Structure formats: structure tokens, C-alpha cells
Image: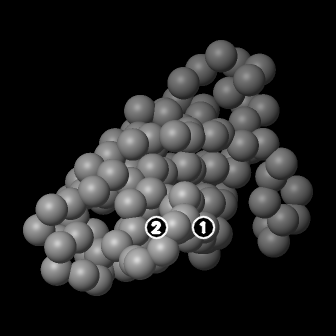
Amino acid sequence: MASDTPPPDEIQVTGMVFFGYHGAKPEEKSLGQRFIVDITVRADLAPAGTSDDLSKTIDYGQIFRVARDVTEGPSLDLIEAVAERICAGVLALSPLAEEVATTVRKPAVPIPGVLTETAVRLVRRRG
């Protein structure tokens, strides 16, 4: 497979809900709110699939812990920064992770209007 083309195989860990204190407004930093995180990791999963060996894949629990540690960790102003740190953390888990896409959704946005949520989706590749 060419190094500039990520593998088609994916690990998806979706719908993770965490409570954090991220936001540019003072009330977001003091009151906190829910964040919903989805992560997709592209990696060659054929060795894991054929061998049934956990060491040949990326442990879903580790992916979850990265998302939790960042989202429940120190306060950031932007969900873009939350997603960026999650991407970096997931890529650091294993050299098998060639690409990671992280969506961070914020269902309670302090703006004067009606909306379901705001979200950012970042995609980062190894190298």
C-alpha cells in the first residue's frame, strides 16, 4: 500500500460522553458541560483479523482513555484544541495508527438561538 494512502480498515469508537470545562465563555469554564466524542482510526487490521491477536491492533480501551483524559482534563478554549489533542494522543498510541479522525460535539452551546449542537471534525495523519 502506498504510504500516502491510508488503509481502508477502521476502528471506530463512537458516542463517548464526557463532562469537561472547555469553552471561550467564563460560564463554560466554571459550570462545565457534556461533550460527545467520536474517533475513527485507520490502520491495517488484516494482521489482527487473521491472527486474533490483540497486539496486532489498537486497543479500544486505550483510545477511550485518550479521549477521556483530554476531554475531562485541563480546560481549553476551543473544541478544535480538544480534538487536536485527542488526535495527537491516539496517533501516539501505536505506529499502526496511520490516520485518525476525531469529532467533538458540544450539545449545550451558550448562544442566543436554537440548535442541536456544534461540532468539529479533525483528520490527522501520521507524519
Identify the disc placed on residue 121.
Answer: 1
Name the residue beneath numbered marker 2.
Answer: 83
Nearest the camera: 37 or 84? 37
- The residue under the point 60% across, 75% down is 127
Image position, residue 17 (x, y; %): 39, 42
Q: Nearer the viewer, residue 32 or 67?
A: 32
Residue drawn at 65 percent across, 16 percent down:
52
Residue 46 seen from this side: yes
The quarter of the picture where the N terminus appears is bottom right
Residue 108 horizontal side relative to residue 19, left or right: right
Q: 68 or 51, which is in the foreground?
A: 68
In this view, 94 is above or below 23: above
Dot placed on the residue nearer the N-terminal end, 1 or 2: 2
Front residue of 116/51: it is: 116
Image spot of residue 85 (x, y percent): 39, 68
Question: Looking at the image, is 67 positioned above or below residue 55?
Answer: below
Task: Residue at the far right: name it.
Answer: 1
In the image, taking residue 57 as reference, residue 19 lies left or right, namely left
**What's under tag 1, amino acid-wise?**
Arg
Dot 1: element = strand
